[in-house]
Image (tube, grey):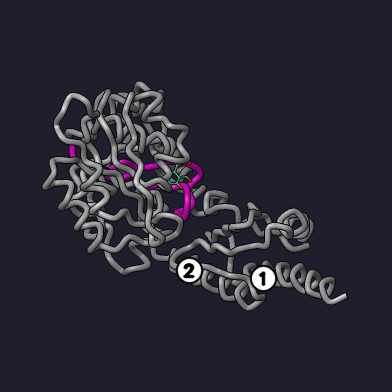
Amino acid sequence: MNPIIDLRSDTVTRPSAGMRAAMAAAEVGDDVFGDDPTVNRLQEIAAERFGMDAGLFFPSGTQSNLAAVMAHCARGEEVIVGQEAHTYRYEAGGAAVLGSIQPQPIQNRSDGTLDLADVEAAIKPDDSHFAITRLLALENTIGGKVLQRGYMADAVALAKRRGLSTHLDGARIFNAAVKIGMPVKELCAGFDTVSVCLSKGLGTPAGTLLVGRKDMLARARRVRKMLGGTMRQVGILAAAGIYALEHNVDRLAQDHANAERLGKGLAALGLKVAPVQTNMVFASIPAESVPALKQHLQSHGVLALVSANLRLVTHLDVDAAAIDRAVAVFASFFQKAAAHAAD
Ligand SMILES: Cc1ncc(COP(=O)(O)O)c(C=O)c1O
């Protein structure tokens, strides 16, 4: 029987044999004392790769984003952020709950960017009526879309001109960098902090790196402690991170090619598919088909989070043959539906 094809997210990957071997062989120590040589090495590699002062290893992207936002903003201060941004929408309001930080959401445009005129207009004047606008937070990729370097540079320039600091949720920044063929150092230049997930397209079981300015990372380290995110012999996970940075970055291009293949396959079935940029495919599904499609996919070994705006994600554990099998499963559903309609 064919194995399950899991297109729910790029977080579903299992560590490869090579990654597991690197984890098993990791030299470790108590990272709370700064004694874990593998964690230290990962943090140095990441800082170097991003051209930043330092790196700090976190258990998750949610915690890394939260620690960064809390490092930038004090109570009563404000972060300007996209309405669709993970930090605003999908992280349980952590900055507001735990940091007393006010989000100022701005509608994302269809390409994922924030209109910089809207950002500028949202910056509050220095007046006791208002929260103090402190931070601009962007996300790249966002919904699989790449923010180009020119836009990122303009956003950073605006923030600097208006005295704001900058944070990038770069959970999938390597997807963006590989797509546009630019080193992350160049793509992220000027940001004060960048959060980079290792457990998404890069395939580790856990772990996120926060890279950035030394003073910000010192503050983020304190917040990480407060959030219970310091770990001990965590070189076992850091070794997976080093392996991922060495082996799994350039190959993201294969995930992008597979996503394009999937998008084309679904479009050929008559579905409306948004242009594919990286490893995510979005297709419109007629609302009345959603429950039956969900069941059909499941019974044919394809896992997907089915909704009227279907999102499918490619990753290390799906190859082109799996994509073709998934397209065939979709085809059998929509052809059956068409045959019924013709009855
Ligand atoms: C863009 C983005 N940022 C941050 C996160 C949070 O990462 P984690 O699940 O490791 O907390 C995710 C998770 O899916 C994400 O997609």
User: Ligand 1 quadrant?
Assistant: top left
Q: Nearer the viewer, residue 20 or 143?
A: 143
Mark 2: few/some/many CA within 10 Å (<14, 14-19, 20+): some
User: SS of the residue at dot 1?
Assistant: helix
Where residue 328 appears, as percent x and y from the top left, is 71, 72
Image quadrant holding the N terminus, namely: bottom right
Count neighbours of disc 1 (C-alpha within 10 A) and say few if under 14, some if 14 to 19, many if 20 or more: many
Where is 301 relative to 62, above or below?
below
Mark 2 vs 1, N-terminal side:
2
Q: Which residues are magenta?
A: 193-214
What kind of element bears circle 2?
A: loop
Residue 211 belongs to the span the image colors magenta: yes
Report whether residue 177 is seen: yes
In the picture, measured across the screen, residue 155 lies left or right of residue 21, that is left
Residue beneath the point at 34% across and 35% down? 103
> Looking at the image, is 330 positioned above or below residue 16?
below
Q: How many marks?
A: 2
Circle 2 residue:
276
Residues under labels 2 and 1: Cα distance? 16 Å
